Image (tube, rainbow, N blue to C red):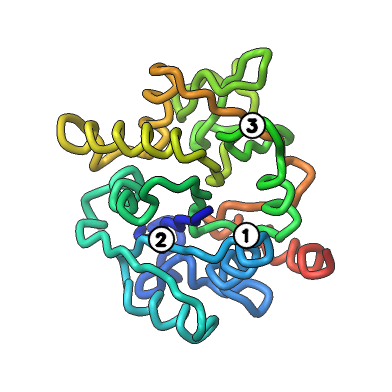
C-alpha cells in the first residue's frame, strides 16, 4: 500500500495567510496539517509516501525533513501548478504508484487517525471514497450520488443538491487494478482533453462510466475538515482538543 498526498495548490481563499505559505503548512493546535496527516497515515501502517508539490515546494520538503528525518518520501514537483489542477498533480504520481494499491489524500485535511484506521479496514470494498453525509451541502462541494449498493454513480459539483448523498472530503482508496484504470484515464484526459485543468473527480466519473466500482463510505461520525476558508480554520481550532484526545 502506498500513499499519495496532493500539495501543489496555492490556497487562494486563505490569502493573505497563504501568500508565501503552502496551505498544508498552516499550523493548527501546534501542528501543521501536513505533519498531522503524515502521523495519521503512519499510524495506519503505511510507509511509502509521495507528496506532489508545486507552490513553495522547498518549504514543504524542508518541513517534512524536520518532522520525520528518517522517513523516505518521494517528492514529485508539479512545475505547472499555477495553470493546472489536482487531476494533473495526481497524474504525475503514476510512476510512483506503479502496480500498487494506493491511498489518495488532499493535503488540506484536518483529521484524526481513527478515521484513516477505520477507512482502511473495510473488507470487500477495494475502491472507496470517504463521504460526509451529515450536515448542509453547498454548491462549492464535490457532491456524490449513489445507488442502492452504495456505489458512487455520479460525483462532482454538478450533482443536484436534492440527489446528493454526501460530500467527498478528499480521501480515496484504490486497488491495484483500479489504480491502473484511473491512471490510464488520467493520461488520456491530460493528452486529449481538459485533464490538466480539471479536478480528479472527472476521471473518477469516467472510470465509473467504464465499469469502475467505487463505494461511498460514510465518515460523518469522525471529525474531519477541509481547510479552504478562514471559517474552516476557526472550526478546526475548535476541533483540536477533540482530535488530540482520541
The CA span between labels 1 and 2 is 14 Å
First along the sequence among labels 1 and 3: 1
Image quadrant where residue 11 sits:
bottom left
The CA span between labels 1 and 3 is 24 Å
User: Label 3, on which residue?
Assistant: 125
The correct choice, above or below, for 186 with respect to 47 in the image is: above
Residue nearer the viewer, 136 or 151: 151
Looking at the rendering, in which quadrant would you find the C terminus? bottom right
Residue nearer the viewer, 35 or 226: 35
Please tell me which residue is depicted at 57% across the width and 33% down the height of the picture.
138
User: Label 2, on which residue?
Assistant: 7
Q: Dot 1 surroundings within 10 Å: few (below 14), some, or many (20 or more)? A: many
Give the farthest residue toward the front: 99
Are the two marked residues, 2 and 3, in contact with CB atoms closer than 8 angstroms?
A: no
Which numbered marker is on residue 110? 1
Q: Dot 3 surroundings within 10 Å: few (below 14), some, or many (20 or more)? A: some
The correct choice, above or below, for 75 with respect to 149 in the image is: below
Image quadrant where residue 239 sits:
bottom right
Amino acid at each position: 500500500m502506498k500513499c499519495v498526498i496532493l500539495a501543489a495548490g496555492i490556497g487562494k481563499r486563505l490569502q493573505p495567510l497563504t501568500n508565501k505559505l503552502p496551505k498544508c503548512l498552516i499550523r493548527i493546535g501546534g501542528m501543521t496539517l501536513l505533519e498531522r496527516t503524515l502521523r495519521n497515515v503512519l499510524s495506519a501502517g503505511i510507509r511509502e509516501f509521495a507528496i506532489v508539490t508545486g507552490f513553495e515546494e522547498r518549504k514543504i520538503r524542508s518541513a517534512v525533513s524536520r518532522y520525520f528525518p528518517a522517513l523516505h518520501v518521494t517528492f514529485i514537483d508539479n512545475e505547472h501548478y499555477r495553470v493546472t489542477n489536482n487531476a494533473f498533480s495526481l497524474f504525475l504520481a503514476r510512476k510512483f504508484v506503479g502496480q500498487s494499491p494506493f491511498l489518495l489524500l488532499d493535503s488540506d485535511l484536518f483529521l484524526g487517525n481513527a478515521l484513516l484506521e477505520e477507512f482502511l479496514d473495510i473488507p470487500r470494498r477495494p475502491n472507496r471514497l470517504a463521504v460526509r453525509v451529515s450536515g448542509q451541502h453547498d454548491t462549492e462541494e464535490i457532491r456524490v450520488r449513489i445507488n442502492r449498493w452504495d456505489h458512487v454513480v455520479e460525483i462532482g459539483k454538478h450533482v443536484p443538491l436534492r440527489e446528493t448523498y454526501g460530500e467527498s472530503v478528499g480521501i480515496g482508496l484504490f486497488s491495484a487494478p483500479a489504480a491502473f484504470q484511473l491512471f490510464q484515464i488520467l493520461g488520456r484526459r491530460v493528452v486529449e482533453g481538459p485533464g490538466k485543468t480539471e479536478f480528479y473527480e472527472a476521471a473518477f466519473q469516467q472510470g465509473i462510466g467504464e465499469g469502475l466500482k467505487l463505494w461511498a463510505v460514510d465518515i460523518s461520525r469522525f471529525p474531519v475538515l477541509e481547510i479552504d476558508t478562514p471559517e474552516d480554520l476557526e472550526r478546526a481550532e475548535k476541533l483540536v482538543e477533540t482530535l488530540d484526545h482520541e
